[in-house]
Image (cartoon, grey):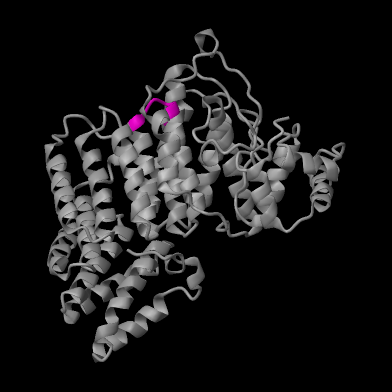
Amino acid sequence: MTKEPNTRLSDLFGLTGWSKGELARLVNRHAAAMGYPQLATDTSRVRRWIDTGEVPRDPVPKVLASLFTERLGRVVTIEDLGLARHGRAGKRQSTDGLPWAPDRTAAVLTEFTGMDLMLNRRGLVGAGAALAAGSALTSAMYDWLHTDPALAADRPPGGAALTAEPAGHDRYEAAPVGSQEIEALERSVEVFRAWDAARGGGLQRKAVVGQLNEVGGILAYRHPDHLQRRLWGVAANLAVLAGWMSHDVGLEPTAQKYFVIAAHAAREGGDRPRAAEALSRAARQMVHLGRPDDALDLMKLAKSGAGDQTLPRTRAMFHTIEAWAQASKGQVQAVRRTLGEAEDLFVSDKGDVPPPSWMQLFNEADLHGMEGLVYRTLAEHDPSVASIAHRHAKEALDMRENGRQRSQIFDHISIASACFIADDPEQADRYARMALLSIGDTSSHRTWDRLREMYRLTGRYADFSSIEDLREEIEQALPKDPGKTAKGSGARV
C-alpha cells in the first residue's frame, strides 16, 4: 500500500459518474461474466484503491480496465488506471507511465489491442480521451530513447521459450513461432500497408489491430535473439499502421497510443530509427490537429534519438514534417531552410544501403508531395508561396505510382488550394473536381478534412457560377457528421 491517492484511477472514476458502491457492484458482476464468479469486493476496497493507492490482486485490474473501457467508450488499460504492478501505483512520474519497463511492452500492447477490438465489436467510438502534449511525451521518453537498446538479458540459455503472464482477458492462446511464421507476418504487414495507401485506414484497421494483438501474444514467449528482434519489428510496423489508420479515421487518442506502442516495440528490437519514425507519425498527427508546437517537440525527440544508423532519406522525411509544423506557425524562413536541408539529405542518399520496408513508400513523389503540403500551409500566411506549393504538388502527382490513390487525392487538393490562394479559380476548379472523382472510394477522414479546408477557400469565389456548382458538389461529398472529422477537433491542414 502506497498511502498515496491513485490519481489516475481517481480522474477516470470521476468521468464515469459512478459511486464507489456502484463500482464495487459492477466489478463483482463483470468479473462473474468474465469467468471469475468467486471475486467479491465492496465499497471500502474501492475507496482504498482510489484514496490510498492500494493495487488490487488479479484479476481485478483487468476487470476494472474492461469496465472503464465500456463506460468511457475508449480504450482504458491497466496502465491508464495506475494499477500496473511496478513503481508506485498512483504517482504521476511520467506521462501514462512512460517509458514502460522492457517486460511490460508486450503486455501493454496486447491489453490495449484487446480493448480496442472490444470497442470495435460493441460499436463504441473511442474518442473521449485527451492527447498527451508533445512536451510531456518528450520529457518522459528522452533518456529512454537515447540509451543503447538491448533485448532483455535475463532469458534462459539457448533462447528457450518461457510462458508469460497473460496480458489481457482478450488475448488468444499464443505459442512460440519460427522463421517461416515470422516471414508470413512480415508479408502481411506489406499487404496492409499497400491497402492503407490505396484506400485509407477505415476498412482494414480492425484486421491490423487483430494481427497486432496476436503478435503481442507471441511476444509473451521468449525466442532466440534473431527471431525476437524480427518479432519486435513486426509489432512496431503493425502498431504504426494501427496508429496511422486510427488517425486516418479520426480516433486521435487511440492513434497516439499506438504510435507510442510502436516506439517501444521498435526500441525493444534495437531499432532506434524505427522508434523515431513512429514518434514522427505522432508529430504529423499533431500538425494535422492544429498543434504545431507539440509536433516540433516530438520531432526534436525523434531526430535526436534516431541514432547514427538513420539513413539520409529518413532524415529528409523528418525534416519535411518539421517544416510542416513551422509552416503552420507561419515561419517562412525556417520553412525554406528546413525544406532545403530535406532536399539535400534526400539527394545525398545514394541507395547503396537498402531502405527498411517502412521507408519504401517515401520516395521522390512523397518528398514533393510533402513540400507541396508545406508550402500550401505556409501560403495561408504568405500567399506568395502558393505557386511553389502548386509546382511541388504537381510534380508529386506526375510521379505517383499506381496504388497510391489517397496521396493522389491529397495532391489534387493541395494544387486546388494553392490555386485558390493564388487567385486562379478556374484552374483550382479543375483540380478540385479531380479530387472529387475518387474521394468517395476511400475511408480516409483526412481527405475529407483537407477537402473541407479547400472548401473554405472557395468562399471568396462563391459568386462564380462554376465555383458555386463546385461548392454544392463538395457539400454533397462531405460526410454528414462533422463531429467525427478534424474540423471538430480544430484541425488545420
Q: Nearer the viewer, residue 90 or 84?
A: 90
Task: Report if residue 442 is visible in the image.
Answer: no
Q: Nearer the viewer, residue 98 or 240?
A: 98
Q: Residue at x 20, y 29 (%)?
A: 353
Q: Nearer the viewer, residue 466 or 22?
A: 22
For the N terminus, the image quarter is: top right
For the C terminus, the image quarter is: bottom left
Task: Report if residue 257 is visible in the image.
Answer: yes
Residue 308 found in image quarter: top left
- Taking the magenta stretch, the answer to whether it contains residue 452 is no
Q: Residue at x 29, y 29 (%)?
A: 307
- Taking the magenta stretch, the answer to whether it contains residue 269 is yes
Horizontal and vertical percent for residue 96? Answer: 54, 41
Q: Which residues are magenta?
A: 267-272
Horizontal and vertical percent for residue 407? Answer: 29, 58
Horizontal and vertical percent for residue 81? Answer: 65, 42
Question: Along the horizontal axis of the image, is 240 left or right of 101?
Answer: left
Residue 82 found in image quarter: top right
Question: Along the horizontal axis of the image, is 372 left or right of 480?
Answer: left
Question: Along the horizontal axis of the image, is 126 left or right of 270?
Answer: right
Question: Along the horizontal axis of the image, is 314 left or right of 171?
Answer: left
**28 in relation to 2, above or below:** below
